[in-house]
Amino acid sequence: NAGVTQTPKFQVLKTGQSMTLQCAQDMNHEYMSWYRQDPGMGLRLIHYSVGAGITDQGEVPNGYNVSRSTTEDFPLRLLSAAPSQTSVYFCASSYWAGQANEQYFGPGTRLTVT
Amino acid sequence: GENVEQHPSTLSVQEGDSAVIKCTYSDSASNYFPWYKQELGKRPQLIIDIRSNVGEKKDQRIAVTLNKTAKHFSLHITETQPEDSAVYFCAASIPGGSQGNLIFGKGTKLSVKP
């Protein structure tokens, strides 16, 4: 099993550009989520999903969209990149039976917005 | 909403000493408390977790204790080794409809000096 994979590993964008961060998992997990990690701020939840066709907002959703058309994939879209979105982005997945369980993280995408 | 405070933000110990990291949470309905280790440039990985129906859990040199009354939980690492050097994050589950979600502390950078 590859676990949770993310692409790209690094990305530089100019202000106003849009892009999609890809995330996929091969563990048949219902729950998937996106976090951003900034120095001294820990991991903050952007969006999450508990199954195909179901998504919801986390702590810091503004400026980001998600969709979940399959169990395996959970892409994160930046609509109009801003310097404040410079961060490391992690995708995670877990088994979900109505309660929290171990989350498996992808390797991360380091995004710089100039 | 749920809030997680983590202390200290940095911790330096000599090899062989013990290290203790403490977290407090605000919502008494939280029922899952994982600890993640993140090495420099890597993804967070679960090292131990505990549910609210258990007071203590051990795995070799690592233990977690939970005090539900005081709403705090702690990570204990005994006989520390240089490879324990990393950033450690605590987290608590968010009660209610989004029960798969976690809120993370801001992290503790542990340095183990040989």
Image (cartoon, coloured by chain):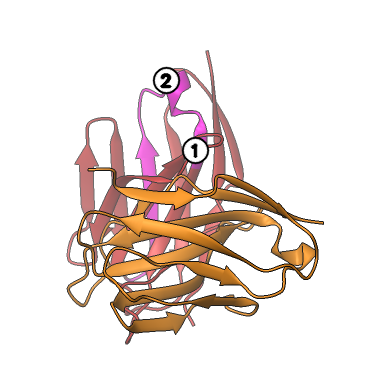
Chain colours: A orange, B red
Output the chain of dot 2.
Answer: B
| Viewport quadrant of the C terminus of chain A | bottom right
Of residues A10 and A87, the one drawn nearer to the viewer in this rendering: A10
Q: Position of residue B109 (x, y in %)?
A: 57, 39
Q: Position of residue B75 (x, y in %)?
A: 38, 45
Q: Position of residue B63 (x, y in %)?
A: 29, 42
Of residues B11 and B92, the one drawn nearer to the viewer in this rendering: B92
Rate crowding at label 1 as few (under 14), some (14 to 19) or many (20 or more) other CA atoms within 10 Å.
few
- Work out whether B31 lies above or below A114: below
- Work out whether B107 lies above or below B105: above
Type of amino acid at the residue the image marks with label 1: Lys
Which residue appears at 57% of the width and 60% of the height?
A36
Q: Quadrant of residue A1?
A: top left
Q: Position of residue A59 (x, y in %)?
A: 54, 76
* Disc 2 element: loop
Which residue appears at 33% of the width and 76% of the height?
A69
* Disc 1 element: loop
Horizontal side of residue A89 vs B84, given as left or right: right
Q: Is residue A15 visible?
A: yes
- Distance in Å between CA atoms under marks 2 and 1: 19 Å
Mark drawn on residue B81: 2
> Is residue A58 found inside the magenta-colored segment of the image?
no
State which region is magenta. Answer: B69-87
Which residue appears at 43% of the width and 54% of the height?
B90
Which residue appears at 45% of the width and 34% of the height?
B19
Mark drawn on residue B42: 1
Which is more N-terminal, label 1 or label 2? Answer: 1
Horizontal side of residue B89 vs A95, given as left or right: right
Discs 2 and 1 share one subunit: yes
Of residues A109 and B77, the one drawn nearer to the viewer in this rendering: A109
